[in-house]
């Protein structure tokens, strides 16, 4: 693929082109779905840079850096597939599909993170360190991307692997946040229900 011209002026009137060449509204469910996946990928790039450039490089952080890069490529593949509706009468495209093995890999990585973590006795709040907070921001955007894809799926069927992948990826971010706090020796912030509604002193 070669991108010689960045602006097309098609979007000036609220439309954009799908990978099949079809013109759709920028407010369509499909655009919202892959646009949110793109937003997730951008935020994930920030997390990757933060992990990679942490002032005290660690071998396990280098591994996380590589894991994040793999996920970024997979998210781009998901975006490509979401931008390519397979409808009768349209030119068929062959984007790189997310397969079940990608979900299995995420599950194995989650299990590996979890091995060094204490079982949770309560909900945790985001925070304690910028890397933890960033992981949770990505978790929330991932959940929103998943909701957008499910909403699209109610109108136009989306492959199960995409929905499962996004669901598992949000779990990956949650456990990653805990794992980063553990490695950085940052105490987790546990939710205290009794403090809800208590005015500050």
Image (cartoon, helix red, strand yellow):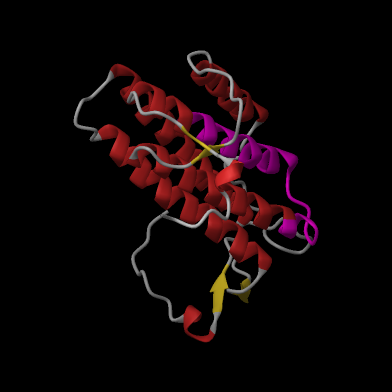
- For the question of whether residue 20 can be seen, the reply is no
Side of 155 where 101 appears, left or right: left
The quarter holding residue 45 reads top left
Seen at 55% across and 39% down, the residue is 191
Which is nearer the eye, 144 or 160? 144
Q: Main secondary structure of the magenta part?
A: helix
Q: Residue 103 falls in which quadrant of the image?
A: top right
Image quadrant containing the C terminus: bottom left
Residue at x-position 54% and y-position 60%: 35
Expressed as whole percent of the image width and height from the top left, the position of residue 84 reads 63, 56
Instruction: Tell me where residue 62 appears, x and y as whole percent.
Output: 31, 24
Question: Residue at left 48%, top 14%?
Answer: 116
Q: Residue 2, how many percent across, how many down?
A: 38, 57
> What span is in magenta?
151-176
Residue 147 versus residue 7 in the image, above or below:
above
Of residues 141 and 80, the one drawn nearer to the viewer in this rendering: 141
Front residue (pair 152, 59)? 59
127 magenta-colored: no
Expressed as whole percent of the image width and height from the top left, the position of residue 77 reads 54, 44
x 57%, y 27%: residue: 106
Residue 63 relative to residue 27: left or right: left
């Amino acid at each position: 693929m070669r991108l010689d011209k960045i602006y097309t002026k098609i979007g000036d009137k609220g439309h954009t082109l799908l990978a099949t060449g079809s013109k759709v509204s920028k407010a369509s469910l499909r655009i919202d779905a892959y646009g949110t996946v793109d937003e997730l990928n951008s935020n994930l790039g920030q997390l990757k840079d933060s992990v990679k450039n942490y002032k005290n490089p660690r071998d396990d952080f280098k591994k996380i850096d590589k894991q994040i890069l793999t996920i970024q490529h997979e998210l781009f593949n998901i975006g490509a597939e979401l931008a390519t509706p397979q409808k009768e009468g349209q030119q068929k495209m062959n984007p790189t599909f997310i397969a079940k093995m990608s979900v299995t890999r995420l599950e194995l990585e989650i299990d590996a993170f979890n091995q060094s973590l204490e079982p949770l006795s309560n909900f945790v709040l985001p925070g304690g360190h910028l890397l933890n907070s960033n992981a949770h921001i990505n978790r929330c955007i991932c959940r929103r991307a998943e909701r957008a894809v499910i909403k699209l799926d109610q109108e136009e069927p989306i492959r199960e692997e995409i929905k499962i992948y996004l669901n598992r990826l949000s779990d990956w971010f949650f456990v990653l946040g805990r794992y980063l706090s553990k490695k950085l020796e940052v105490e987790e912030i546990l939710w205290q229900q009794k403090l809800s509604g208590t005015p500050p002193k």
